[in-house]
Image (cartoon, rainbow, N blue to C red):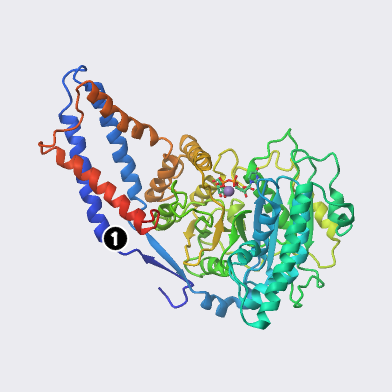
């Protein structure tokens, strides 16, 4: 590691012990398969069919076990050096665009959305270099109203956060988890801010409940006039409203500092055109932002995922701006952590094995998957650029526009980029922007970026970068897993199957890593067979396993016990199980 490095990559400890263990399991698996092949029952009546079935299930599990080794073989951890970043780049940090997606003011309450937006506006980063965009697929005036309120509240909230170095900077979370400071000078300021916040959220809640923005409030901003009575969430023209223009010299917070740009976008919706869900929203955001701020870095978060660490932009930039190792990094992915998990996490939704083990393992093969939220991208790579050694990022890029330009004209131009027809006969949704047609648009998009020669990095700091709302009930869990497993299986069945599409483009270890998720769904079939067939056969007096007294019993019991013990240790170490 040279002194100039902005980040370090460290190999996880205990790799030798793990590899030794893995070799013993491999030997056990080999013996099991050997036993199956050499002890085939002579006739169908003696259970030959079930035996073959079980052998195939074991073969499958052996294969699946092998691919899961890819992400356990060599996990790595990353560390960043933000002080060096500041020393070298403070005056010339790049512009950053932040994209937040929301879809429905009732499922994703506007108060939650603006709490996220405010946490992102308050990043410990020069505000004049920051632009926050909200895509509202619900096209709701209620969400727009909440955003207008947020644009006013931000003037108080941002300086308050920075002055007091608050964490987290999502007001809804901050006020529900922290107490009023004791010393008198802070006490009043804190209480004042809390009252201001509560008054705002009460107004928003009341208006969301009533479903209508009162006429007198509409006079506060020209944007409200964009909504017409005939508009619905499924049919409406594109709306782009710049709520705060960072280039406007008069856009200042109450401490006299510049404010980040804040933009509301509802792309056009029309039932005649497919909207392609979040991927469609993201692609509209890429285009709309390109004429407003056009920053080289784009952070993408879901609206329920607030920033929990005010330094995340700086951490991510340590990867991109590292002169030697950062050149080929296309995206920096943070784990998807939740703040609403129950203590026992009955359904394992904390995803800690994925977050603490598997993503670190993927990172050693060229990088983690793009998981749709908490991810920093280069704008160029999201727009389809291939990696070449000569490629040099223009970190100074930004929109050329003049602070005195007519804002409404700019908004109209942006609206023309967010229409239903804009993408017809273009590469958007294919080679440009996020990929359409796959339920996990993020995973496939990340894969395509990596296949264009780029790498990614996984950053999992102790102070979590982002916290969101995860599933907690069985019904929500099943829905989430269905979507993820179906979407990933869809990738496997498509021409983007990593072993074919990724062949020669990404490392074999990474191809295998992707397949852990791509084959998640398929894994259920041999598993079901394995738990059902042996018991049913026993009813017919056929045993599909060796007797306990036979030496062949040893590999079976070893593999079972050792694998289970290891999984337990992994879960315990990563706190997936609380005892
Ligand atoms: O038509 C749509 C549908 C969804 N969204 C937004 O997309 C995000 C994710 O959608 P959600 O329904 O919450 O999906 P989840 O299953 O919770 O999302 C996880 O899985 C998705 C697919 O892998 C990723 O895109 C997400 O980032 C990841 O959090 C949310 O902010 C939505 O508001 C839209 O903007 N437009
Ligand atoms: Mn979600």
Say few, some or many: other residues with alpha carbon within 10 Å of mark 1 (under 14 / 14 to 19 / 20 or more). some
Viewed as shown, does residue 472 lie left or right of 248? left
Tell me if I can see residue 286 in this picture: yes
* x 47%, y 34%: residue: 493
Say which of 79 and 176 sits in front.
176
Residue at disc 1, secondary structure: helix
* Up-down relation of residue 48 to residue 445 (above or below): above
* Place of residue 491 in the rendered image (x, y in percent of width and height, measured from the top left): 49, 39
Which image quadrant for residue 498?
A: top left
Task: Indicate the quadrant containing the N terminus: top left, top right, bottom left or bottom right.
Answer: bottom left
Viewed as shown, does residue 556 lie left or right of 390? left
Which image quadrant for residue 543?
A: top left
Viewed as shown, does residue 21 lie left or right of 445? left
Tell me if I can see residue 128 in this picture: no
Mark 1 CB within 8 Å of ligand 1: no
* Place of residue 490 in the rendered image (x, y in percent of width and height, measured from the top left): 50, 36
Task: Indicate the quadrant containing the C terminus: top left, top right, bottom left or bottom right.
Answer: bottom left
Residue, disc 1:
15
* Up-down relation of residue 551 to residue 579 (above or below): above
Say which of 137 and 158 sits in front.
158
* Place of residue 577 in the rendered image (x, y in percent of width and height, measured from the top left): 38, 53
* x 69%, y 63%: residue: 131
* Place of residue 91 in the rendered image (x, y in percent of width and height, measured from the top left): 64, 78
């Amino acid at each position: 590691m040279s002194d100039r490095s902005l980040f370090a990559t460290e190999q996880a400890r205990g790799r030798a012990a793990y590899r030794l263990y893995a070799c013993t399991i491999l030997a056990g698996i080999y013996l099991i398969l050997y036993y199956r092949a050499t002890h085939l029952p002579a006739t169908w009546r003696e259970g030959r069919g079930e035996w073959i079935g079980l052998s195939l299930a074991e073969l499958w599990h052996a294969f699946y076990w092998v691919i899961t080794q890819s992400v356990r073989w060599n996990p790595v951890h990353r560390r960043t050096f933000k002080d060096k970043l500041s020393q070298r780049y403070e005056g010339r940090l790049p512009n950053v665009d932040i994209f937040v997606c929301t879809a429905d003011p009732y499922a994703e309450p506007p108060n939650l959305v603006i709490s996220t937006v405010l946490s992102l506006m308050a990043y410990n980063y020069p505000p004049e270099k920051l632009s926050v965009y909200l895509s509202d697929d619900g096209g709701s005036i209620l969400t727009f109203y909440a955003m207008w309120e947020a644009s006013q509240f931000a003037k108080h909230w941002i300086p308050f956060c920075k002055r007091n170095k608050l964490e987290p900077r999502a007001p809804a979370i901050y006020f529900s988890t922290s107490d009023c400071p004791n010393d008198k000078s802070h006490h009043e300021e804190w209480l004042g801010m809390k009252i201001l916040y509560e008054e705002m959220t009460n107004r928003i809640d009341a208006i969301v409940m009533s479903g209508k923005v009162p006429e007198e409030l509409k006079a506060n901003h020209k944007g409200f006039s964009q909504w017409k009575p005939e508009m619905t969430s499924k049919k409406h023209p594109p709306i782009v409203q710049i709520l705060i223009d960072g280039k406007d010299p008069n856009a200042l917070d109450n401490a006299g500092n510049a404010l980040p740009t804040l933009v509301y976008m509802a792309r056009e919706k029309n039932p005649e055109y497919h909207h392609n869900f979040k991927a469609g929203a993201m692609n509209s955001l890429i285009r709309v932002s390109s004429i407003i701020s056009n920053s080289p870095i784009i952070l993408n978060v879901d609206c329920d995922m607030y920033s929990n660490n005010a330094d995340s932009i700086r951490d991510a930039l340590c990867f991109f701006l590292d002169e030697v190792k950062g050149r080929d990094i296309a995206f920096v992915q943070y784990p998807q952590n939740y703040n609403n998990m129950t203590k026992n996490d009955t359904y394992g939704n904390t995803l800690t094995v994925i977050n603490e083990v598997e993503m670190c393992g993927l990172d050693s093969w060229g990088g983690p998957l793009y998981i749709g939220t908490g991810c920093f991208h280069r704008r160029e790579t999201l727009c389809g650029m291939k990696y070449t050694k000569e490629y040099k990022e223009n970190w100074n890029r930004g929109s050329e526009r003049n602070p005195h330009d007519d804002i409404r004209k700019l908004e109209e131009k942006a609206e023309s980029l967010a229409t239903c027809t804009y993408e017809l006969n273009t590469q958007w949704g294919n080679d440009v922007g996020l990929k359409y047609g796959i339920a996990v648009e993020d995973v496939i998009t990340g894969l395509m970026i990596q296949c264009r020669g780029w790498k990614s990095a996984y950053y999992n700091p102790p102070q979590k970068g982002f916290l969101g709302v995860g599933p907690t009930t069985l019904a929500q869990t099943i829905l989430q897993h269905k979507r993820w497993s179906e979407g990933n299986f869809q990738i496997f069945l498509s021409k983007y199957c990593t072993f074919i599409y990724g062949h020669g483009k990404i490392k074999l270890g990474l191809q295998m890593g992707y397949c852990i998720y791509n084959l998640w769904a398929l894994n259920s079939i041999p598993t079901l067979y394995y738990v059902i067939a042996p018991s049913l056969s026993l009813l017919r007096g056929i045993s599909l396993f060796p007797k306990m007294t036979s030496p062949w019993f040893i590999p079976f019991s070893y593999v079972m016990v050792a694998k289970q013990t290891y999984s337990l240790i992994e879960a315990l170490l990563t706190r997936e199980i609380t005892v």
